[in-house]
C-alpha cells in the first residue's frame, strides 16, 4: 500500500473552508484514498473515500488530482467540532493485507 | 455514537494485576480489531478477528490475550503489563475483511500501567 504525507498541523477559522492536503505520489492504479478523523479522546471516524473521481458526502468533499498523486479533503464550513486529527490512507480495496497504514495525520485546529 | 462500545473508558492497573477490556458492536459486523495508540505514534494493529476466528496477530506480547466469544463481543485480557503498555486501546469493527477500509471505532480505553 502506498505511503502518504500530510502536514503535521493546520489552522482554520470557524465558518471558513478547511482544505487538508495529502500527498501519495506512489499510489497505484487500483488504490483508493480514504480519510478518517479522530476527535480528541475518541476513536477514529471514517469520513470519505475515492478512487479518481471527486466525491462528496454530508461530511466533506474529496478532490483527487488527475494524476492521483495528491488529494485534498475539504470541510466546506468548518466548525469548532471539526477540530481533530485527520488521517489520509491509501489502500487497494479488498487487498490481502489486513492492515490500514496509519500515519500521524494532520492536526486541524478550528479557531473561533 | 458509532455502534461500538468499549468498557471501561479508563483503567489504572499495577504491573501484577489482571484486567480485561471489553468491546461490543451493535452493527452486525463480522470482523473486529484491537488497536493500540501510544502518544505521538500511529495506530498499531494488534489483533484481527473474522467470524470469531483470529486471523491476524501482529507480534503482540503474550501478556495481551484476545478473546472473541461471538461476532458481537471482543475482549482483551491483560496481565503482568509494563509501564510502556500505557496507551489508548481502541476496538473497531467492519462488515467483513473485504470492507476493512471502512471501520467503525469505539471510544477507546485509556490504560495507565503503574
Image: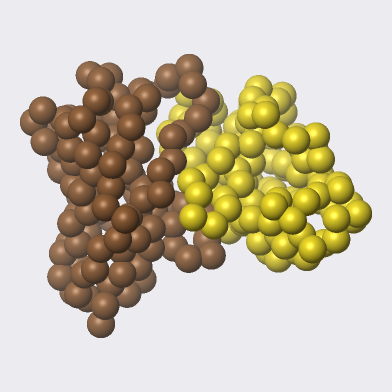
Chain colours: A brown, B yellow
Rendered residue at 66%/61% (across/down): B110
Q: Is A33 above or below relative to B24?
A: above
Question: Where is residue A11 drawn, in percent x and y?
Answer: 24, 68
Q: Is B5 above or below relative to A77?
A: above
Question: Where is residue B111 drawn, in percent x and y?
Answer: 70, 59
Rendered residue at 90%/55% (across/down): B17
Q: Is residue A69 visible?
A: yes
Quarter location, residue B69: top right
Rendered residue at 21%/70% (across/down): A12
Q: Is residue B14 left or right of residue B102?
A: right
Quarter location, residue A16: bottom left
Question: Where is residue A73 drawn, in percent x and y?
Answer: 22, 50
Q: Is residue B69 visible?
A: no
Q: Is residue B102 left or right of residue B7?
A: left
Question: Where is residue B32 drawn, in percent x and y?
Answer: 62, 36
Image quadrant containing the N terminus of chain A:
top left
Q: Is A101 above or below relative to A43?
A: above
Farthest residue to the bottom: give it. Answer: A112
Which of A79/B78 is in front?
Answer: B78
Q: Is residue B38 left or right of residue A30?
A: right
Amino acid at each position: 500500500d502506498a505511503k502518504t504525507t500530510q502536514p503535521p498541523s493546520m489552522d482554520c477559522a470557524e465558518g471558513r473552508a478547511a482544505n487538508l492536503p495529502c500527498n501519495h505520489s506512489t499510489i497505484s492504479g487500483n488504490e483508493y484514498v480514504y480519510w478518517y478523523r479522530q476527535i480528541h479522546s475518541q476513536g477514529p471516524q471514517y469520513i470519505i473515500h475515492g478512487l479518481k473521481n471527486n466525491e462528496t458526502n454530508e461530511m466533506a468533499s474529496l478532490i483527487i488530482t488527475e494524476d492521483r498523486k495528491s488529494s485534498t479533503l475539504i470541510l466546506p464550513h468548518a466548525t469548532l467540532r471539526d477540530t481533530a486529527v485527520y488521517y489520509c490512507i491509501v489502500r487497494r480495496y479488498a487487498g490481502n493485507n489486513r492492515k490500514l497504514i496509519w500515519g500521524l495525520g494532520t492536526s486541524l485546529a478550528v479557531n473561533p | 455514537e458509532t455502534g461500538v462500545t468499549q468498557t471501561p473508558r479508563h483503567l489504572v492497573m499495577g504491573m501484577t494485576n489482571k484486567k480485561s477490556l471489553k468491546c461490543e458492536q451493535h452493527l452486525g459486523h463480522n470482523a473486529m480489531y484491537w488497536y493500540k495508540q501510544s502518544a505521538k505514534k500511529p495506530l498499531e494493529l494488534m489483533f484481527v478477528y473474522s467470524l470469531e476466528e483470529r486471523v491476524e496477530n501482529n507480534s503482540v506480547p503474550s501478556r495481551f490475550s484476545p478473546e472473541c466469544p461471538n461476532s458481537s463481543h471482543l475482549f482483551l485480557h491483560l496481565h503482568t503489563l509494563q509501564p510502556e503498555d500505557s496507551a489508548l486501546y481502541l476496538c473497531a469493527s467492519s462488515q467483513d475483511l473485504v470492507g476493512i477500509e471502512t471501520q467503525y471505532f469505539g471510544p477507546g480505553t485509556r490504560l495507565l500501567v503503574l
